[in-house]
Image (cartoon, helix red, strand yellow):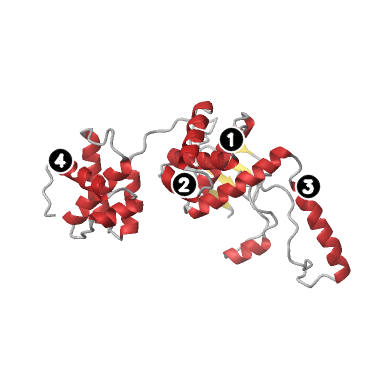
Amino acid sequence: MAEEKTKSEQVCPECGSTKIVRDFDRGELICVTCGLVIKDKMYDRGPEWRAFDSEQRDKRGRVGAPMTYTIHDKGLSTIIDWRNKDVHGRDISPTSRAQIYRLRKWQRRIRVSDAAERNLAFAMAELDRLSSHLSLPRSIREAAAMIYRRAVEENLIRGRSIESVTAACLYAACRQRGVPRTLEEIAEHARVDKKEIGRSYRFIVKELNIRINPTNPIDYIPRFASELGLSSTVQQRAIEILEQAIHMGLTSGRGPMGVAAAALYIASIEKGERRTQRDVSEVAKVTEVTVRNRYKELQEKLDISIDV
């Protein structure tokens, strides 16, 4: 029997039942309660082949990579492989090799045809380089690429360096998606200084009307704890301390990285995984004085007793 129950939001127009069955052999959608054929001649949009592992799926698939905003042409253009092999894996003859070389050369020229595409190609390469250095996920790269494309459409790039705008878009995407990276971290790997990135960031956020929430110090805890080799118990305790501090308004006007570092320092001592103020300050990229001042404030206001 080729019937299979599927979760569907459809309701039977005859009896109002939500018990819908899809018959894949006949291509029909049938109500179980009253037997009404709700829809017929349905198309199966899946592949006509089956695969039992990822290797088989890769071999039998006949489509390319999905569309992406991180490539200037969105990854939709044809790419001629750099290897001199034919479809069967055999070496191409020397005569054909010269022809393929010319095809590759013209293909590279055709892919980038005007100034706007050259701008995008350079910016996307720079964005990929920065994201790799900062170990950012694919979703952040896509979000930053979309912001940059919007800036190009609004003609906001004119008069500014591509490097500064790219870094600013990446910083904005990190802030939007809750993957905190500071301007200092981005400027460390960018080809422009922090001041220029900040100027471009403020301009783009204002002109594109991008809503950016204030950085939450809790967002820094998993990354700092991972670099310090602290357990999940310490992370959870640090988050509890920060939640109390935020509720009492103790984080207002304070740098989020310093507050997060102080909370981790207190939690590491409480849970018996002590880390020095120097260790914490190096990971958080703040001074030891900042960690000391912040942890004393938290200790006093939250009535936390630790043996330093």
The tag earlier along the polypeptide, 4 or 1, is 1
281 lies left or right of 300: right
Horizontal side, residue 63 vs residue 244: left or right = right
Residue for point 12% across, 51% down: 306
Residue wearing tag 3: 110
User: Along the line of sight, which residue is nearer the eye, 72 or 287?
Assistant: 287
Is any part of residue 145 visible from this angle?
Answer: yes
In which quadrant of the rendered image does the N terminus lie? bottom right
Q: CA distance from mark 3 to mark 1?
A: 27 Å
Vertical order, 190 against 14 (above or below): below
At label 4, the amino acid type is Leu
**Circle 1 is placed at which residue position?**
160
Q: Residue at position x 67%, y 62% from top?
A: 60
Amino acid bearing label 3: Ile
Q: Which dot, 1 or 2, sits closer to the camera?
A: 1
> In the rendered image, which quarter is residue 148 located in?
top right
